[in-house]
């Protein structure tokens, strides 16, 4: 399930101006990791593709997944948010979709757009709108989606440039604000305090800051508090999927840092969150996050 929109590349300066304006207004976090991300956001034509005329923005529905971890003879159901697992869609499949189902005319070229703010592109193209939680929502998908963008030398008849908008439903709703465990959401705008966002801290290595309440953690990676309670997500959430169970022995080995090659391969296949090649970097994060979730349930 996908949907798309497009804008002309003539809007690149305006996209950069959007980010600069937010920065000048003090609405972008000064956190080191977030700043590192911003440094890589660029809107310019890729080298070797000077004839690009448009940028296509696609949203693909990506459901949250549930997985059971068995530990001490009990089953612990934990959610994996959409952006943290491999949905199995190959790059060649995406390219084929763009060329054959969107452009549909032979002879045109595409190139994956990297180092762009996909959320901003989606909202500016009219494909999506912001929620009060600073997440992009698309009709029929809610916020449960993956965004892709491609440059192309195909010129669309319509240039779908839109004003930045928040969903109408957000105007009189503050459910996500009340549910945010770290108070990173604001009543005034749809720009969050990224330095307070739980997601920022449980995606990276290291111990959690002391100011984060251990009860705040709710998913194996990232945070779904503001999305699970959102009225715009209720239909999409019901389409959650399920991964294969993690056995008692596998859970123990994760927590005890005794994960050998066989278990690495098993976990990689079941969770689809990492490859065996990057297990060394991923497993310490998984171990820490799993431990705090089990502690929350009084099981560790």
Image: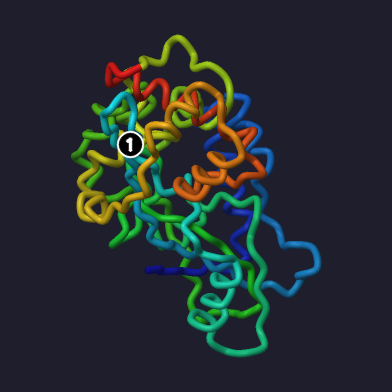
Toward which corner of the image does residue 67 lie, by quadrant?
A: top left
Residue 223, position in %: x, y?
A: 38, 34
> Which quadrant is the C terminus positioned in?
top left
Residue 70 placement, left or right of 146: left
Q: Nearer the viewer, residue 274 or 188?
A: 274
Identified at 35% across, 29% down, the residue is 185
> Which quadrant is the N terminus positioned in?
bottom left
Residue 211 seen:
yes
Residue 288, position in %: x, y?
A: 48, 23
Residue 262 placement, left or right of 183: right
Identified at 54% across, 70% down, the residue is 94
Residue 250, position in %: x, y?
A: 45, 34
The single residue placed furthest to the top in the displayed view is 210
Identified at 42% across, 62% down, the residue is 60
Residue that badge 1 annotates: 78
Residue 32 placement, left or right of 244: right
Residue 202, above or below 164: above
């Amino acid at each position: 399930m996908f949907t798309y929109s497009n804008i002309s590349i003539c809007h690149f300066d305006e996209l950069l101006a959007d980010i600069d304006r937010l920065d000048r207004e003090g609405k972008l976090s000064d956190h080191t990791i977030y700043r590192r991300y911003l440094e890589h956001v660029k809107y310019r034509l890729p080298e070797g593709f000077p004839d690009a005329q448009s940028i296509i923005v696609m949203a693909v529905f990506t459901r949250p997944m549930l997985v059971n971890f068995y530990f001490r003879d009990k089953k612990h159901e934990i959610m994996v948010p959409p952006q943290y697992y491999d949905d199995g869609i190959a790059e060649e499949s995406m390219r084929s979709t763009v060329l054959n189902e969107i452009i549909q005319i032979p002879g045109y070229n595409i190139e994956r757009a990297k180092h762009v703010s996909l959320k901003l592109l989606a909202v500016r193209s009219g494909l999506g709108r912001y929620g009060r939680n600073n997440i992009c929502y698309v009709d029929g998908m809610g916020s449960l989606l993956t965004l892709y963008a491609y440059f192309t030398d195909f010129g669309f008849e319509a240039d779908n440039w839109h004003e930045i908008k928040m969903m109408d439903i957000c105007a009189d709703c503050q459910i996500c604000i009340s549910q945010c465990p770290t108070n990173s959401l604001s009543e005034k705008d749809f720009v969050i305090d990224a330095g307070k966002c739980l997601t920022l801290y449980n995606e990276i290595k290291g111990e959690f800051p002391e100011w984060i309440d251990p009860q705040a953690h709710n998913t194996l990676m990232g945070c779904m508090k503001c999305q699970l309670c959102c009225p715009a997500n209720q239909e999409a959430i019901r389409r959650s999927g399920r991964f294969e169970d993690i056995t008692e022995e596998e859970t123990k080995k994760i927590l005890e840092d005794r994960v050998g090659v066989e278990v690495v391969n098993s976990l990689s296949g079941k969770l689809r969150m990492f490859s065996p090649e990057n297990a060394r970097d991923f497993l310490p994060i998984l171990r820490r996050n799993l431990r705090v979730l089990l502690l929350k349930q009084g099981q560790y």
